[in-house]
Image (tube, helix red, strand yellow):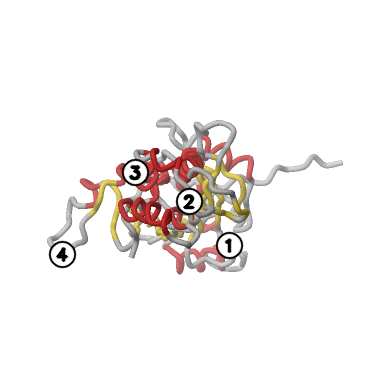
Amino acid sequence: MGCSFEDHRDLIRASEASSFDYTIADVHRSPWRHKAVESLDENRALDSAKYPAMRRGNHLDDPPPTLFIWAMFEAANAVQVRVSIDEIQPNVWRRLVLPVHWNLEQLHLGIQAAFNWWNYHLYEFRIGGLRYGEVETLTEDATDNDPRVFDQSEVRLQDFEQGAVFSYHYDFGDAWRHTVAVEEFLTLSSTPKYGSCVAGERGRPPEDVGGVSGYERFLETIADREDPEYAETIRWCGGYFDPEWFDLSIVEKDVRNALRSNVNRRLYQPKPKAFPKK
């Protein structure tokens, strides 16, 4: 059970008369950490008091706890996340560095860009058993028994803890589920204006291929030129498909343009460049 920010404030105060060491990690692990920082910042009078040494790796000699915690969290202006498509082996994944102020709707666009999904199916986030997305769209045909949908724009990446893991579902027909892991909050020299992709592996399945089972059948078909469905299938996917495809420069450009309203998605996977004959 998490502590409230009032609990954190009381814990700091109690430490003046106790013998235990209070660590930054205690605040960092709490889902209320930002409120804790704000609350502590309102009590700067405590800064002049003597507290047991707070530490994060190395001991510090009686630092002002309010200023130290405030500076630590205010400095984070980006977050590194790893997004992978569930149930596909070898894993299809992307590592993204995104502005911490992005909300879930912007994260959705970043994921779409990173995998070059076409962004024309329904989607939602599942976080701690709750649903987040476009409320009006997802509740249009909902019944009284369906779980409530919360507004995706009200949740920002800075609201998550480091180490948090949640799900992103795209295309309820094919049912592509992605695992999103918050790996690290970063302090960059300047606040990023765009998202970026820093690593990844393998190409995502074609849109409307039929989910995990359909993708498995698709790979079997294009690997066998004698398959009676080979010609039609390879033509359907643009004449070429490599499950191992990943080009960081292309994906980085896609993610950088993720929030543009007029962005164009590639219909098919890029074909390898032909080398001139000697």
Q: Mark 3 or 4 closer to N-term?
A: 3
* Viewer-nearest residue: 13 or 174: 13
Secondary structure of the residue carrying numbered label 2: loop
Label 4 to label 2, Cα distance in Å?
A: 52 Å
Looking at the image, do the residues carrying marks 2 and 1 touch, with CB atoms under 8 Å apart? no
Looking at the image, do the residues carrying marks 3 and 4 touch, with CB atoms under 8 Å apart? no
Looking at the image, do the residues carrying marks 1 and 3 touch, with CB atoms under 8 Å apart? no
Q: Which residue is mark 2?
A: 51
- The residue lying at 45 percent from left, 57 percent from top is 26
Q: Mark 1 or 3 closer to N-term?
A: 3
What's under tag 1, amino acid-wise? Ile
Q: Against 106, is 241 above or below?
A: below
Label 1 to label 3, Cα distance in Å?
A: 59 Å
Label 3: few (<14), some (14–19) or many (≥20) C-alpha neighbours in 10 Å: some
* Viewer-nearest residue: 41 or 163: 41
Label 3 to label 4, Cα distance in Å?
A: 39 Å
